[in-house]
Amino acid sequence: MKGKGEHILVVTLILGAVLFSFGCSSDSNSDALLDPVSQQDISGVWLGYIGSTFSVGIITTDDGEEFSSLFIGQDKNENYNLFISDEDDLLVQNADSYIFTGGLDAFFWDTGVVEDYSTLAPLSMYVWTPGATHQVMGLGLPAGAYQYDESGETGIFAFVYNTTYNKVLPNVNNMSGQWRMENVFVGGNTLVLTIEPNAASTQETTISGEDSRSNTFHGTVVVHYSPVEATPRNVYDISLELNDSQLLTGLATYISETHTSGIDVSAKTLAIGAISADGLYMLGGLAIQE
């Protein structure tokens, strides 16, 4: 595995050759990156791209210094995958800089085996990105980038902060109803997830689902709290049991119809990502409310 110094050298060369922007290279959102260096808070929900893969990023923190990330990706062929923080290399802000660095593991479904929702061995990547509190990551100059350890593949890492209910307390009932996800695990497979309304609580509820292959899911949705957040954001802890045998845990969020900074989400969307403790099974994707 390459050391951080080697990664930064390669990424710097990429950034010198590539300018990536959602049409906002002169956007005032980048102004914060020109201010004297201060601690930036990148926790919350983000919309953008890892290479050509559209992704919804859910970032949490327990101490305000290390940030754990879950990116739910959908590529141009409508295949889903998850990018999950390496627990030994969380995203951190570099000293005297607004640059964040850290490691992600990319998980893809193994569609060539009998077991549904099983995964291939994860691919490791290194991320280098500027970040501004609740504004942008990797936009403008310098741009953000990633590099896969195994193949050396590099690309752009760029996100805008999603403000869906940013100033409203999270409420599981805002996610209630049926959500349809297409081409799950294999092409043509449809999964319908049902999140039950809870008249007695805004903090937790139940979730269940079944796909076209008779796989079943059931579990819970709970508002996510962090010790350093005075007010929780639109982030939810997910626990799902696959076929009454595999426990998957992770995070979820929902985003309203969004058209900003080159990001177009045409309808209210549920983003969900959950994986087994051993990393052998996962559920991840974007679902539209029925």
Image (spheres, rainbow, N blue to C red):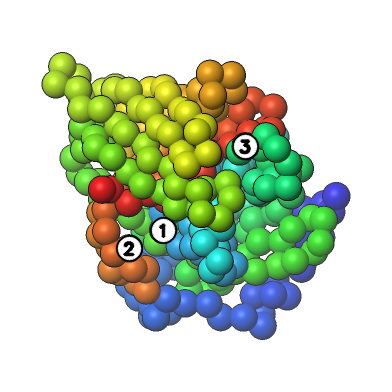
Q: Dot 1 lies on which element? A: strand
Q: Is residue 49 visible?
A: yes
Badges 3 and 1: C-beta atoms under 8 Å apart?
A: no
**Mark 1 to mark 2 CA distance (whole Å):** 10 Å
Which residue sits at x=61%, y=38%? 117
Left of 118 or right of it: where is 238? left
Left of 250 or right of it: where is 90? right
Left of 126 or right of it: where is 269? left
**Occupied quadrant, residue 118:** top right
Name the mark nearer the viewer: 2 or 3.
Answer: 3
Q: Residues within 10 Å of mark 2 (few under 14, many from 20)?
A: some
Name the residue that disc number 3 marks: 116
**Mark 2 to mark 3 CA distance (whole Å):** 29 Å
Name the residue that disc number 1 marks: 47
**Occupied quadrant, residue 87:** top right
Which residue sits at x=37%, y=56%? 161
Badges 1 and 2: C-beta atoms under 8 Å apart?
A: yes
Of 282 and 141, the residue lying toward us: 282
Q: Between disc 1 and disc 2, whose residue precedes?
A: 1
Q: Residues within 10 Å of mark 3 (few under 14, many from 20)?
A: some
Name the mark nearer the viewer: 3 or 1.
Answer: 3
Which residue sits at x=28%, y=48%? 289
